[in-house]
Amino acid sequence: MTQTSLLLSPFQLGPTKLANRMVMAPMTRSRAAAGNVAADLAIEYYSQRAGAGLIVTEGTQVSPRGVGYLGTPGIYSEAQTAGWRKITEAVHERGGKIFAQLWHVGRVSHPSFQPNGGLPVAPSAITPAGHSRTMTGTQPHVEPRALESAEIAEVVAEFATGARSALHAGFDGVEIHAANGYLIDQFLRDGTNVRTDEYGGSAENRVRFLVEIVTAVAEVWGGAERVGVRLSPLSAFNDISDSDPFATFGAAASALDGFGLAYLHLVVPGSFNPESEEARITAHLRERFHGPLMVNGGYTFDAAEEVVASGRADLVSFGSSFLANPDLPERFAEAAPLNAPNPATFYGGGAEGYTDYPALGATVSA
């Protein structure tokens, strides 16, 4: 029996009407073809999941300098744009909506990924802990090159190029990836940004790079109503840190509030627990950003239903559960069991663990 649900009800996201409030979260799958072109197999992968209210693609690098992983797609060349166009057309044919996530990894790249073997770029020359997986095996991260003040406009322009390619590829909008320890997040956090120019120091200065990117991307799209931003205010992923995330991300949320964004997307694992720090910072940012708020981080159906019904968020994004259940909204509607995701097939490979998870009607009973 189909259950009544606010999570499964339609939602108006700016000019885009969503069939439900469930979003397929961006997930790197490392299956791109040569030239960082989205592979044809991705057409089936994304169109299988068109029942989501909105799909946000895996991170798509906006320039060759933005690459930091094997097999990740880009969105700056004609071939890449053409590859994504096949995907958007397939998703639209099945009634879905899809945003492209615009990405630059910054310091967590490696010279083997960079044009002419150059150093990765960052706000400051601070080496991250950890390693890169390269064509020649696992290599330690290197000390990045701090961007000169005059170069920052070039990187902003790269995001505008990615946004323009996404527009030409037929996407319904774009999400700016400012989370998870990548380049924009590196500018936001004082653990990775020790600049002394107008892009460093105060929280307002550290937010400047993000604001300039949003401004440039919104101009490409004729306004910000088809532009989302993703933040991860408490994440330590990719050796990222901040001395006062409430102040830093409060400044970011306040700066973003004036744009009229499609949404603000927060990676806040466990925020469904009202006593958690993640729940507190979500509420803190909700007070400062008055547009649609999307939350992500281990949500079950019941937890997602409760956070939407309470008004603490408007949308919920699902990662591995959407990966393993292409028909996740239908399963939630029917209170049906879920396929379990297989972490061994998350990254790289072919159809196994990518397009072969069974739909509800094909599930074999024990």
Image (cartoon, rainbow, N blue to C red):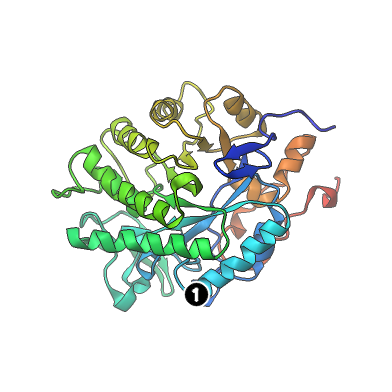
- Check the picture and name the quadrant holding the C terminus: top right
- Is residue 134 something one can see in this rendering? yes
Q: Residue at x 49, y 55 (%)?
A: 101
Q: Residue at x 44, y 28 (%)?
A: 286
Q: Quadrant of residue 122?
A: bottom left
200 or 291, which is in the foreground? 291
Q: Position of residue 45 (x, y in %)?
A: 66, 60
Q: Quadrant of residue 82?
A: bottom right
Q: Position of residue 289 (x, y in %)?
A: 41, 32
**103 above or below 308?**
below
Q: Position of residue 147 (x, y in %)?
A: 22, 60
- Is residue 37 something one can see in this rendering? no
* Amino acid under disc 1: Glu
| Mark 1 neighbour density, 10 Å: few (under 14) some (14–19) many (20 or more) | few
In this rendering, would 267 be left or right of 125?
right
Q: On the image, numbered disc 1 is attached to which residue? A: 78
107 or 92, which is in the foreground? 92
